[in-house]
Amino acid sequence: MDDRTKSPSKGLAQIILALSPADGLVVVPLGEQYRWANTALQLTPGFKQRPDGTYALRDVDTAAPILLALADTARRHRVHLFGGPRPYLGDYAAALANGVPGEWTVKVEVYAHPVWQEDLVPLLWDAGELIASVEHARIPYGAELTSSAGIELLLVERPGSAHEYLLGSFASTPFDDNYADPHAPRAVVLPSDTARAASLVTGTFLPAYEQAVHERLLAAVEAGQARLEELHGTWAVIDASGRYTDGTPLDQPTLSHIADQYLVESAREFRHLRPHAAQLLNRIDAVTGMPPEDAAALARLRKLLPIAAPQAMWPAPLAASPPRLLSASAEEVRRWRVDAPALLRQARALRPPRPEAVNARTALPAAAKALPAPATGAPRTR
């Protein structure tokens, strides 16, 4: 049996074996011809297929003859077997989730065919080694950790390492453009000791993630507000002078058309800004010493903006959003423009503190070494 940390790209069909205290021997069929691996497992008595695409042999005391039979069947179906020192990824993920504050669920996903992991690329929100590994190395499977607060993380075995793991994040709601985002947090390298790993996630990664979400929301609201003010400034000059910005006189029908155009464009900008502003507002609780005028402005904004409940990090398409998110009146835009400066002031003042620096390896650019071959599971859908 080959060590999968040394030669995992060998063959068009592979089977990875890992021990699990809870599940016994867990087996993962992979590769461009992963169906051959499935066939080998189905022809070997003792292995039970599970909904996530893995197989399990619960009674490890009877494993020796079953493994010999599997090795023979795999050889006849041109399937390569790989094993290694790592525990089953699902067990590591569960132990990690139990050590991190909050309520978390764990789901293992198998990317059996190599192209399936490409589905992860537009969903990840990472500026470190995780995104580089998904793009350039072989990631046969991963564990998705989801908190009750809506945080979604991806845990994978670190390519080229027999004992380390990578943890990074999926996109933060309500954004859907994550690639090369300057605010994206960096994935963290975790040790095999889950207690130390949980401490690193709690003390370093999650604070960095919270800071990144705050900065991203703040930047989006600032940019949207700047566009609204620019539109309003242009319209105010035209409305006051009766002339276009280049001095051209405007007749009443043209002036009315420009007024309508301003209302449409400003409503569109506010519609796109609104979910980001609502998320940002949700992050600002009552603060001691907040000026009364800012407190009053935020109270008005809470009535104007929809209060977003925790949700999955990958947002629904805009067309599927509640009707209120799809329209904005001129009065709503006016009310927003009056109170937006207070929200931006308080959001800037409440930036989360910067976490302590992650250990040096996590800050290195992600020159992930390609993990040779195993292919994995089902494409990700959200």
Image: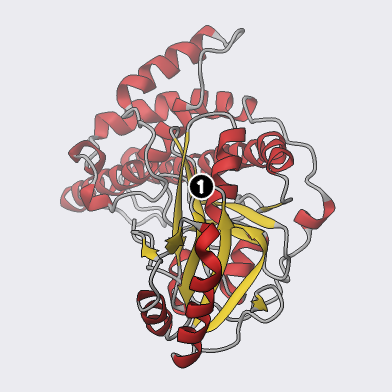
115 up-or-down from 144: above or below: below
299 up-or-down from 196: above or below: above
In the rendered image, residue 263, in percent from the top left (x then y), is placed at 26, 43
311 up-or-down from 2: above or below: above
Tell me the crowding category of disc 1: few under 14, some 14 to 19, or many 20 or more residues within 10 angstroms, Cα based: few
Residue 180 in view: no
Specify the quadrant that holds the C terminus: bottom left
What is the residue that sits farthest to the right in this orientation?
A: 360
Figure coloring: secondary structure
Left or right: 311 in relation to 369: left
In the rendered image, residue 45, in percent from the top left (x then y), is placed at 38, 71
85 up-or-down from 374: above or below: above
Q: Which residue is mark 1?
A: 22
Left or right: 271 in relation to 344: left
Total numbered labels: 1
Specify the quadrant that holds the N terminus: bottom right
Of residue 314 and residue 25, the one placed in the foreground of this image is 25
Of residue 130 and residue 138, the one placed in the foreground of this image is 138
What is the residue that sits farthest to the left in this orientation?
A: 253
**Mark 1, secondary structure of its residue:** loop
In the rendered image, residue 89, in percent from the top left (x then y), is placed at 57, 56
Residue under the image location 60 percent in, 34 percent down: 100
Residue under the image location 58 percent in, 62 percent down: 18
Residue under the image location 71 percent in, 57 percent down: 164
Displayed quadrant of residue 205 = top right
In the rendered image, residue 230, in percent from the top left (x then y), is placed at 45, 45
Give, as a three-letter code, the residue at label 1.
Ala
Residue 321 in view: yes
